[in-house]
Amino acid sequence: MKNISKAVEKKDHKQKTSGRAMYIADKKLTGELQAAFVRSELPHGRILKIELPPLPEGYLAVDGRDLADNHLQVITAEQPVFATEEVSYIGEAILLIAGPDLATARCLCRETKVTYEELPAVLDMDKASAAAARYHFAKGDVAAALARAAQIVEETFTTGYQEQAYLEPQGVAACWDAEEGKITVYGSMQCPYYVHGALMRALNLDAQHVRVVQEVTGGGFGGKEDYPSLLACQAAAAARKAGAPVRIIHNRREDMAVTPKRHPGKLHYAAALDAQHHIIGLKINICLDAGAFPGLSSVVLQRSLLSAVGVYRVDNLEAEGRAAITNTVPSGAFRGFGAPQSVFAVESLMNHLAAKTGMTPLAFRLLHGVKQGDETGTGGRYHHHVPLPDLIARAEELSGYSRKYAEYARPQTGRYRRGIGLALFLHGCGFTGSAEKDVIRSRLILRKNADDRVEILASNTDMGQGLKTTFSKIAAEALGLPLERIICRNPDTDRVPNSGPTVASRSILIVGKLIERAARRLKAEWVSGREQEVQEVYKDDVLIPWDLEKFRGDAYPTYSWGLNVVELEEDRLTGMTNLLGIWGVFDVGTVIDYTIMKGQAEGGILQGIGYGSMEKLEAQGGQFRQGSFTDYLIPTAMDTVESEIAFVDNPYDGGPFGAKGAGELTLLGGAPAYVAAVEQATGRAYHAVPLTPERILAAEDKGGEV
Amino acid sequence: MVEFTLNGKNVTSQQPPHTRLLDVLREEFGLRATKEGCGEGECGACSVLVEGMLWNSCVTPLANVRRKSVTTLEGFRDTERYRLLEQCFSEAGAVQCGFCTPGMIMAAEALLSHNPWPLEAEIREAISGNLCRCTGYNMIVDAVRRAAAKGAGLW
């Protein structure tokens, strides 16, 4: 194992374990007010009248008129911070009431009467005419491939919402300094500079008059990428109007009802096979439910499309997609960012095609796996080593996949049947397309104090993934210093440059590389006892430039790769499953900390299995039918099983010490591997996740497929 | 007014008897290691020990702990047992975002104090009322197993 990969105690371990880490709900500000919301009860309607109850002294109502610009800056700025004339989804904030006692504020909100004129609502993405984005790309000649195919197989896959279910609900606190005309927002968040930009716009302040401070963050998984910007603008409007600090902490029900989820998806595949069972063409159509506003959906859709062919080489390809606008809660970021939908679909398709051709799932995959130098679907290239054979060899060794597959393929009898499933996947590292170069342009500073300790000044956040530790390890290794001499604090925009958001598995790859470069320079210039500062900015190393208009080029500088195997026993009577084994083999380049990376893998796989098996979240009439952990089920310790995790060594020169992106990759294989295992146990084909016991039984009742 | 023992000291809460124990601990006594994750007894982030048993303080009315002994992480973190758990949680990589961790530590203590040599299945059951979204649980199970193995005589 490389020196840097050796596990260390995490920098924040003692704080967190002893309960001394202060999350935003644990911090009280002197004289603070708390706030509750009046929210839309209709998926679509015109607000005719708002009647507030008499507000007791010390309480105030805040709405869109209290902002200089009532638009939320995300990629574009369509979503209002508070709905003013029209409501577009159930749960959309219309106004808030702030005051010293939260229970009283909630009562006042309940007593507020909103009269609407109901407008027609679009609740089904199939019926939506508006789209947040549409893309199309093609390679080769699909029409010709379909025309000469020996067999054409068409399948449609559906995927549900998924809730991030970070254990710490969303929360922020805002303070207005009237003398300086400066707003400060503290909170649980992934992207302090996103919040910073949103506040500048909403309050019409310059950069110096907005300060955003990340507090200890209890999980994000994408859920704290965009939503904290909205909450921050709402709290800031209230703080400025009240002249007092305002703290907003969502309870779980409010959090689940109004914050962004993973996009539900509908993915149609038409596969053209030749007589030798080769896929000679694929035509793919993806529709994601963006919800009421575009938000991040355009980029989510890009990643869905770019992931839709999985790890396979298809010479004739046509893919199109749209992110449909509906009157539902805006969908957003969730670990994987559009890829989990596609990976489930393409991996399931591969299993179904393998079955039709009489090949094993693995043999059929090997026939189509990409190799180094192959062209991607968008005219980019797999420039670097593609480790699929390494992943497969290691997974066979650990799990005995092929042996067990053959064993369970024999006829089984009795109530409990076994199955084993496999999924192969890749994840493009960092932002999709040219955003690093054109939008983010990361800046990173290493500051050496007179005491020869070095502080990393970056805007990236530790939300549990261990970034303070991994960033510090990179700096320590490059400087040749002990880890204790490296300081990495929660970002405060008054102190740190904009090194970009903590998203897209980019922190280690992009910002970690800047840390490595800055550290090497600082080491060369090192003068003991003197204050020194080194700055680094992002340098583009994408080989084939990305063109979004044409949807062509290298969408990512490189890829991380993974393989999951899931073995289970299925109860034919109840449809319940019992996991017997989980394996994960990954190529994330150099592992920066073995224990941290294992934790990413373990957690990501179980989120993926949850997505594939039990995490049911449905909207009916624009309203979620599940509202809390009581009815939205995430896996418990009893729903999982011991797993084995391994990494293959495939360092990437563009990343620090050879590291690549890692966080999101680990979620992608759980759902398809789980479903594949159930398929082997039951002998059925499934096309939807979550594949709940109810769905398994429904397929039996229908005597066919779901 | 409700009297109970809090982290070894006799205390009297001034809150109405139906107040959630969680709010009494966090707001009245300022003990914020105990977290609120769901507010309906599903996630276990608010776990405390009542008479050595693991309780969800968010669904416990204050009146239910009258004359009982309540222990929060603040009352446990200076013990040998805690120090071993902290070390084992570190070695196993059982802490990511940390929000479930105080509850997990209390769940581990509740288990080990009743069953110092738990089987893997017993560890899973003991922490099954505590949700964790980051770790996938196996590293937490490993941490508790390590603590049991190293903690001969402590529990």
Image (cartoon, rainbow, N blue to C red):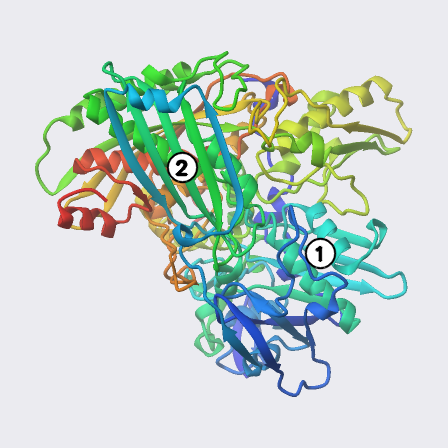
Mark 2 lies on residue:
A285
Asked whether A28 or A219 is in front, the reply is A219
Q: CA distance from mark 1 to mark 2?
A: 42 Å
Q: Nearer the viewer, mark 1 or mark 2?
A: 2
Residue A390: % across, % down: 41, 15
The local crowd at label 1, few if under 14, some if 14 to 19, many if 20 or more residues have their Cα within 10 Å, is many
Residue at horizontal 47 percent and vertical 34 percent from the top: A305
- Residue A632 or A86: which is nearer the viewer? A86
* A175 relative to A280, above or below: below
Q: Which tag, 1 or 2, sits closer to the chain's start?
A: 1
Q: Is residue B26 above or below residue B97?
A: below
Q: Residue at x 78, y 39 (%)?
A: A497
Along the viewing direction, whichever of A44 and A144 lies nearer the viewer: A144
Q: Is residue A282 visible?
A: yes
Q: Amino acid at mark 1?
A: Tyr
Name the side, left or right, on which A188 lies relative to B142. Answer: right
Q: Quadrant of residue A643?
A: top left
CB of mark 1 within 8 Å of CB of mark 2? no
Residue A286 in the image, given as x and y percentages of width and height: 42, 39
Label 1 belongs to which residue?
A: A186
